[in-house]
């Protein structure tokens, strides 16, 4: 989230003409966001129109990931436009944008974790799949994902409202997460939460991958496909991690290209915010044979 405002201000100080550089970055960001949300919205429409997807836990988890991405991308692009138009916004308004962005960011690795577990159950203990992976339990899992993310984020808002002065809350700032949530407690808790989430997700991915790899030695087609799916989950988690290591990644690029601040900030914004949202529908939706068959029908209709 920090990179949005930094990107705009970095471009302005990069030696590129201020107005044209800002306008180009904003236009590219908005166009990419609209394109990805259009693809994701078509996938949601495909899911909602076919009963076969609504009764399958795998597709329910996938479409939740898509909806989560749509929320995050909409919030990020909206804030991108606000920072371009106004440069500074009120602290409380900034916080209202940051909260859903952080929530959806933390939802993504947790969603991938449960998708990996579902894949593991379908391959390694198929006889219990229908018992363990039901529609009701899948929606309970989604509720758990949101509850865990809320419990890690909402205390930040409580600390902000109880420790900061009214003058600060109504002041205008460049919308950075660290600018709004200034408490050292919040920063330490954020770092701890990121580490805990990533450790749990990576341990789960390693376990499910090697268990599925063992089953795949029997040359079972489904097991081999599941193994590849777990690898893709790992790829997606790596993309998610770019948000967590964003400050260090930005400083590393700035050390390599000190005279291209604007380009560096915008590149990090695309890598950390746009690329993960773009890859999800390709990795999971288009790759799935059944979903792809129905999805292509609606894309063709829209073209007509």
Image (cartoon, grey):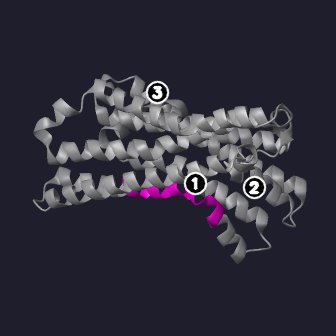
Q: Nearer the viewer, residue 187 or 28?
A: 187
Question: Which residue lies under the disc numbered 3?
Answer: 45
Q: Secondary structure at mark 2?
A: helix
Q: Residue at x 60, y 50 (%)?
A: 273
Q: Is residue 24 left or right of residue 74?
A: right
Question: Which residue lies under the disc numbered 2?
Answer: 7
Mark 2–mark 3 Cα distance, whole angstroms, equals: 33 Å
Q: Main secondary structure of the magenta part?
A: helix
Q: Quadrant of residue 82?
A: top right
Q: Would you say the residues marked 2 and 3 are in contact, meaning their CB atoms lie under 8 Å apart? A: no
Please say whether residue 179 is visible from this viewpoint.
yes
Point out the tag, 1 or 2, that comes first from the N-terminus: 2
Q: Residue at x 44, y 50 (%)?
A: 197
**Mark 2 Cα within 10 Å, few/some/many (few <14, many 20+)?**
many
**Mark 3 Cα within 10 Å, few/some/many (few <14, many 20+)?**
some
Question: Which residue lies under the disc numbered 1?
Answer: 243
- State whether residue 15 is above or below residue 139: below
Q: Would you say the residues marked 1 and 2 are in contact, meaning their CB atoms lie under 8 Å apart? A: no
Mark 1–mark 2 Cα distance, whole angstroms, equals: 14 Å
Q: Is residue 193 magenta?
A: no
Q: Residue at x 33, y 56 (%)?
A: 203
Magenta residues span 233-248
Q: Secondary structure at mark 3?
A: helix
């Amino acid at each position: 989230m920090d990179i949005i405002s930094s990107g705009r201000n970095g471009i302005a100080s990069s030696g590129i003409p201020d107005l044209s550089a800002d306008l180009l970055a904003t236009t590219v960001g908005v166009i990419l966001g609209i394109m990805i949300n259009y693809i994701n919205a078509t996938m949601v429409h495909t899911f909602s129109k076919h009963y076969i997807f609504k009764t399958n836990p795998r597709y329910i988890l996938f479409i939740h990931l898509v909806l989560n991405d749509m929320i995050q991308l909409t919030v990020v692009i909206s804030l991108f436009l606000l920072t371009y138009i106004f440069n500074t916004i009120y602290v409380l308004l900034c916080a209202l944008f940051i909260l859903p962005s952080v929530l959806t960011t933390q939802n993504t690795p947790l969603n991938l974790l449960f998708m990996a577990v579902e894949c593991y159950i379908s391959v390694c203990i198929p006889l219990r799949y229908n018992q363990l992976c039901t529609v009701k339990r899948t929606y309970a899992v989604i509720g758990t994902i949101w509850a865990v993310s809320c419990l890690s984020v909402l205390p930040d808002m409580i600390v902000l409202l109880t420790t900061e002065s009214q003058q600060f809350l109504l002041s205008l700032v460049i919308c950075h997460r660290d600018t709004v949530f200034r408490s050292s407690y919040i920063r330490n808790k954020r770092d701890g939460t990121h580490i805990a989430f990533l450790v749990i997700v990576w341990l789960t991915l390693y376990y499910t991958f090697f268990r599925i790899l063992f089953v795949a030695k029997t040359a079972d087609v489904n097991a081999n496909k599941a193994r590849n799916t777990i690898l893709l989950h790992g790829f997606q988690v790596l993309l998610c991690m770019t948000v967590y290591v964003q400050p260090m990644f930005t400083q590393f690029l700035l050390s390599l290209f000190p005279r291209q601040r604007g380009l560096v900030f915008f590149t990090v914004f695309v890598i950390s915010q746009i690329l993960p949202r773009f890859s999800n529908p390709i990795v999971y939706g288009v790759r799935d044979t059944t979903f792809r068959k129905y999805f292509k029908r609606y894309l063709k209709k829209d073209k007509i």
